[in-house]
């Protein structure tokens, strides 16, 4: 008897099992952040959605110096930013805005700066209430400090020099756009012969 015939003879009365319905084990609702990432990945993210926090961030002291740079930013570049040596290509004034208004303005400003290929911009957030004896009253300053760290397009930032607003303003170093990177490569390669490693 052939193997196939033996197999079919042995399996003659066997019925296939019915698949059991699957159940999702994680019944927690998706967080807002997870939902936003899912929508962004599917290309459905509404332009009105803003991932920046609008509550829960502590105010800062009016004289606190904002200071942040991502890994990979050269110290010389950061020093020039800190000293206000780069031309300011655009400014945003947040004075007299609520936190929610400022949040939308900052996000839009950073996106616009990236689309326009701007490299160095300034945000004027103010120092808070005009009471020198009260500490930690710079509400918008605290939010701006957190928001800029949350935005990947911002490579570094530092409180401005007194001529540009001092600790009531901040310089931003934006990520280089693809066009700027190409322009820098072309400028660097001008008159040079590419190295051919054969």
Image (spheres, rainbow, N blue to C red):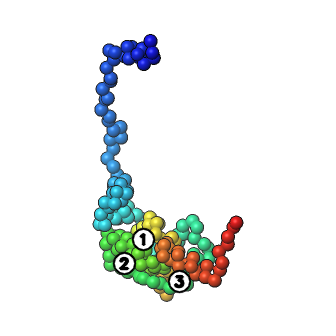
The N terminus, quarter of image: top left
- Residue at (61, 79) in percent of width and height: 189
Q: Position of residue 40 (x, y in %)?
A: 36, 59
Q: Is residue 137 left or right of residue 17?
A: right
Residue in the picture at 61% in, 73% down: 75
Is 82 in front, or is 46? 46
Q: Residue at x 37, y 13 (%)?
A: 9
Q: Quadrant of residue 82?
A: bottom right
Q: Nearer the viewer, mark 3 or mark 1?
A: 3
Q: From this viewpoint, which residue is outermost toward the right?
A: 198
Q: Nearer the viewer, residue 120 or 161?
A: 120
Q: Which mark is residue 94?
A: 2
Work out whether residue 21 can be spotted. Answer: yes
Tell me if label 1 and label 2 are in contact, CB under 8 Å. Answer: yes
Q: Which mark is residue 144?
A: 1
Dot 2 surroundings within 10 Å: few (below 14), some, or many (20 or more)?
many
Residue 150 in the image: state x and y as whole percent: 44, 64
Residue extending farthest top: 1
């Amino acid at each position: 008897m052939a193997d196939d015939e033996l197999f079919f003879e042995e399996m003659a009365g066997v019925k296939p099992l019915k698949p059991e319905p699957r159940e999702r084990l994680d019944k927690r609702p998706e967080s807002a952040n997870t939902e936003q990432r899912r929508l962004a990945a599917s290309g459905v993210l509404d332009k009105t959605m803003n991932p920046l926090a609008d509550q829960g961030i502590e105010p800062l002291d009016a004289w606190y110096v904002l200071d942040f740079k991502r890994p990979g930013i050269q110290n010389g570049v950061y020093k020039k930013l800190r000293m206000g040596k780069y031309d300011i290509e655009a400014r945003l004034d947040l004075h007299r805005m609520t936190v929610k208004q400022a949040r939308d303005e900052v996000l839009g400003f950073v996106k616009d700066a990236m689309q326009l290929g701007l490299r160095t911009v300034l945000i004027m957030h103010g120092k808070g209430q005009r009471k020198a004896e009260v500490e930690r009253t710079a509400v918008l300053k605290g939010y701006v400090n957190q928001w800029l760290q949350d935005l990947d397009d911002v490579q570094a930032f530092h409180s401005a020099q007194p001529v540009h607003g001092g600790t009531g303003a901040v310089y931003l170093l934006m990520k280089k756009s693809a066009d700027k990177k190409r322009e820098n490569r072309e400028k660097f390669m001008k008159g040079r012969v590419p190295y051919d490693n054969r």
